[in-house]
Amino acid sequence: MSRNAPKLLARKLVRALVTLVLMVTSVFILMRCAGDPVTVLLGPDATPDMRAAYSGELGLDRPILWQYLVYLHNIVRGSLGVSYVYRQDALGVVLSHLPLTLILTGSAFTLAALTGIAGGIAAAVLPSSIIGRACTVASVVGLCVPSFFLAIVLMLVFSIQLNWLPTGGAESWRSLALPAVTMAAASSAVLARYTRVAVREALDSRYVLAAFARGIPFWRILIHHVLPNAAAPILTIAGLLIGGAVTGSTVVETVFSWPGIGNLFVTSVGNRDVPVVQAIVLLAGTAMIMTNLAVDVGYTWLDPRSKSSET
């Protein structure tokens, strides 16, 4: 490890901490501006005494700055507050929905990685063939079609017309198929395009031309020379996709009624359940930041030249 590595790591950690504070502050302000949670929870027929008592119980009768400082203090102590709706620890409510989101995002990303990287390699190696052109067209379609529209089309075809798969829920693996494919479509298209460009640049490099001149078989050149040098940009975009998968599952989980944290997020925003919303945002932001940190470390390991360029 170089002498500058601790400084670089400390700089990244400070940047991550600042990002988390700004993110939590933004959500706190936006949720307070969205409306009074007491009105949503008690309804319009609640008396002023009921509103005052409930506001005092939730601590909403205090000044905004006091509420914000209390929330930051609770985060430092490891507490994210009590859910207004579930009357339970907000973090516990979020963590109870997390396994299903991890199952969905893990399945979707695995499918996206297999199809996207394979399609990108095929489009780069065989650009004029039917397979290469089909992969290129499929990646463009995957980027252009919105996830909610694709979800509705898949439900119409496979659930209503063919009656093969359920339209929603999380009862079995059959319920996972449609939301996983919907989530994987856009990520697969992004991976395919980045992989095609990275592999194409590696194939046009001088060391690959020299390997061809020495008579090395193409499959060995592809495995030992092209793919390792094309891995760095692919790893970068894959890390961004993994980090954004939790928040990106919101639309898919809502359409397919998948009981994960994305669906919980939409419900909590509608109910003005501020502690749960803030817990979800904090968890998703932490996942994104840790993923980016892991990508930076992996990028440095794959391409040692990035150490000197960053220092």
Image: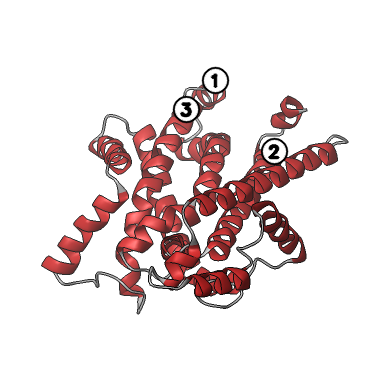
Q: Are marks 1 and 3 in contact (CB under 8 Å)?
A: no
Give, as a three-letter code, the residue at label 2.
Thr
Residue at 76% x, 42% y is 14
Mark 2 or mark 1, which is nearer to you?
A: 2
Looking at the rendered structure, which numbered label has been put on residue 248? none
- In the picture, the quarter occupied by the N terminus is top right
Mark 2–mark 1 distance (CA, rounded to whole Å)? 23 Å
Give the number of the disc on residue 206.
1
Counting every numbered tag in the picture gives: 3
Label 3: which secondary element: helix
Single out the residue that lies furthest toward the right.
Answer: 3
Whichever of callouts 2 and 3 sits on the residue coming sooner in the sequence is: 3
- What element does badge 1 sit on? helix
Neighbours of disc 2 within 10 Å: few (<14), some (14-19), many (20+): some
Decide: is 276 above or below 69.
below
The amino acid type of the residue labelled 1 equals Arg
Q: Position of residue 250 (x, y in %)?
A: 41, 57
Q: Which residue is mark 3?
A: 203
Indicate the position of residue 229 as horizontal and vertical percent values. Answer: 57, 34
The residue tagged 2 is 300
Structural crowding at the residue carrying mark 3, measured as other residues with C-alpha within 10 Å and reported as few (<14), some (14–19) or many (≥20): many
Looking at the image, residue 286 lies above or below residue 299: below
